[in-house]
Amino acid sequence: MSEKKIKSEISKLILKFSRKKLKKISTKQPIIGGLLDSFEMINFITEFEKKFKIKLKTKDLTPVNFETLSNIHKLVKKNIK
């Protein structure tokens, strides 16, 4: 999957679970506390793991890894096989 496609899929998931009605997410926009609250993050991570066929380790579930679209993209690249 290309980098552009990965970022696009991540954006779609964030927009799906966010209560804020946006059409696009910038790569530096805050995700945690900005677009998703703690309950929405749980749903996002569950769907995120299914979408990319990955299982995140507990050590990966840090605020920094989910802070921005760019950080989430790095997390996918690190875990995708």
Image (cartoon, rainbow, N blue to C red):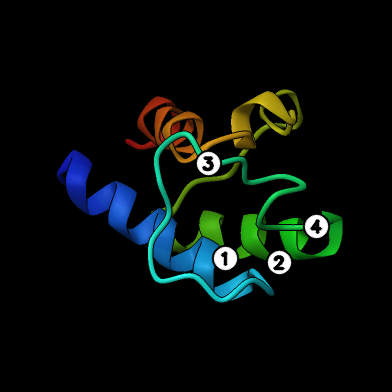
Could you tell me how far apart the alpha carbons at marks 4 and 1 are, in whole angstroms? 15 Å
Nearest to viewer (mark 4 / mark 1): 4
Hey, what amino acid is under mark 4?
Answer: Asp
- Number of other residues with Cα within 10 Å of mark 4, as a class: few under 14, some 14 to 19, many 20 or more: some
Quadrant location of the C terminus in the rendered image: top left
Which secondary structure, mark 1? Answer: helix
- Number of other residues with Cα within 10 Å of mark 2, as a class: few under 14, some 14 to 19, many 20 or more: some
Nearest to viewer (mark 3 / mark 4): 3
Could you tell me how far apart the alpha carbons at marks 2 and 4 are, in whole angstroms? 10 Å
Question: Which residue is label 3 attached to?
Answer: 29
The disc placed on residue 32 is: none
Question: Which residue is label 1 attached to?
Answer: 47
Question: Which residue is label 2 attached to?
Answer: 43
Hey, what amino acid is under mark 3?
Answer: Gln
Which secondary structure, mark 2? Answer: helix
Question: Which residue is label 4 attached to?
Answer: 37
Nearest to viewer (mark 1 / mark 3): 3
Nearest to viewer (mark 2 / mark 3): 3
